[in-house]
Amino acid sequence: MRFVERFKNQLTWIVVTSLIVLAVFIGKNRSEQSKQEIIQQYYLESKYQIRQVNQNKWIIYDISDHNENLLYLGKAYGYNGEVEVLFEVDKDSLIQKTFPASHQETPSYFDKIIEKHFFEQFQGKKVAEFLKNKPVNAVSGATITSNAIIQATKNGYAQGENISVTETKYPLFGMLEIIVLYLFVAGIVMSKIKNQKLRKTLRWLTIFISLIFLGFIYNQPISYSRLSGLLLGNFPDWHKEFYFYILFTGSIVIIFINRKNVYCHSVCPFGAAQEILAKTGRAKVFRPAYYKKLKFVQRFIALTVVLAALSLNNPVIANYEVFSAFFQLTANAILFAVLFIVIILSLFIKRPWCHFMCPIDSVFDYVKLTRKSITGLWKK
Amino acid sequence: MEEVNKQKTRNILPSIFICMAILLLIIHLAVQLLETNKSEKEITNKDLQWPEKPVESLKPDSIWEGTEFIPE
């Protein structure tokens, strides 16, 4: 019987892993729009003549008024992946227009950038200013995407003009890294402590720290779209976002060492929010007869979504968590409706989002399955 | 028997809400999939409003060197 179960686990692991690898392969081999095609979307052939100077620089000649401007293309890493920006510079070295060439950012955040007229801020700024400082203000609530656009402008100009720029140095260990480390250590310590009172105190302290800092202040839980981006090779800059690597590798390493999912239990800020709601409503554990079927649905959706995101080479598709709706009030109406249902449910049943909807829970189930499959290889 | 029925009733309401939330998530994913196919050009033309040409004007610098364009 145990052998049959072990075989079933290993077969599931092989099927899931093969599907993911295949989706990554398909996604990586998708033909992307060429730069020339992107530029021609904005500068119609009937109105402009375009000549490429180098990889990042073009001359745009306006046939109607015989005016010519320079066009640059720059790239930088955003939240989920690369952000590409096009910007036009006139003969006075002033930026005339800046617009997105391509991006993999979460739509609600990118919409915020558009709504707040972020791109319009660039107009009239001297392009060389971007090499020294940040002449435009980031949109609050979409800071990572805004900074990526600013960085892409700087990179595009520097590469187009062959100017070497010194990279900004970031402290490797900031407040966020310290908080994430504390949450992991507290999670491990809690699982070892036998004194109930001490454990309870530590638990509530951890819940509030996670909720306030990782949730409301930084809004940096592990997101599914970011994990999908990692599988597509979009690695965030570890100088800037070292906390992400601590979060991600820390969660996986702990599961491999002692089978405990410390991230969901102690680190996730939305888990902390549900714990507080559960305490308020005196919620109970919900284990109906069809619990396994609901779990299957949760995992099936998570797998289908990640396969779609990987094969289409677009991690944004995997964005369906309610974290941003809760912590930053940034989401579409449907996600707000889901959040509302989850909040109401959290008052009566414990952690409904984690148990029945969260894709990250399924990711860690997969990591546990990987562990089981590996250890099962030498168990006879 | 009565206890079993009570338990069943207690389970039904949360299950309905859970299924409703899952259904909404599926709708959200479908909408998102359709929206990601929307071209960037659409965003630019519809939502970006360019103000008039900037008033500030500075002398040209080296970026134009060697980029003389000869229209066809």
Image: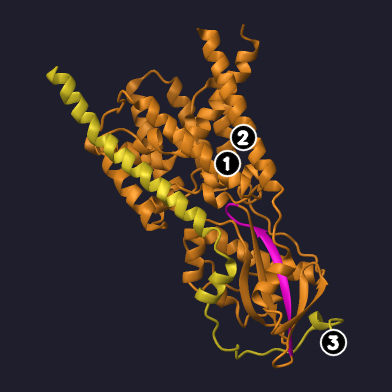
Disc 3 marks which amino acid? Ile
Disc 2 marks which amino acid? Leu
**In the image, which residues are magenta?**
A67-80
Against A202, residue B25 (above or below) is below
Residue lying furthest front: A46
Residue under circle 2?
A: A19
Residue under circle 3?
A: B70
**Residue A87 occupies which quadrant of the picture?**
bottom right
Foreground disc of the pair 2, 3: 2
Residue at x 46%, y 51% (from the top left corner): B30
Residue under circle 1?
A: A307
Q: Judge the density around disc 2: few (<14), some (14-19), many (≥20) Cα neighbours within 10 Å.
A: some
A68 on left or right of A358: right
Q: Do residues under tags 1 and 2 come within 8 Å of each other at their CB atoms?
A: yes
Disc 1 marks which amino acid? Leu
Quarter of the image with the C terminus of chain A in it: top right
Q: Is residue A266 visible?
A: no
Q: Which chain is orange?
A: A
* Label 2 chain ID: A
- Mark 3 lies on a secondary structure that is loop
Q: Which chain is yellow?
A: B
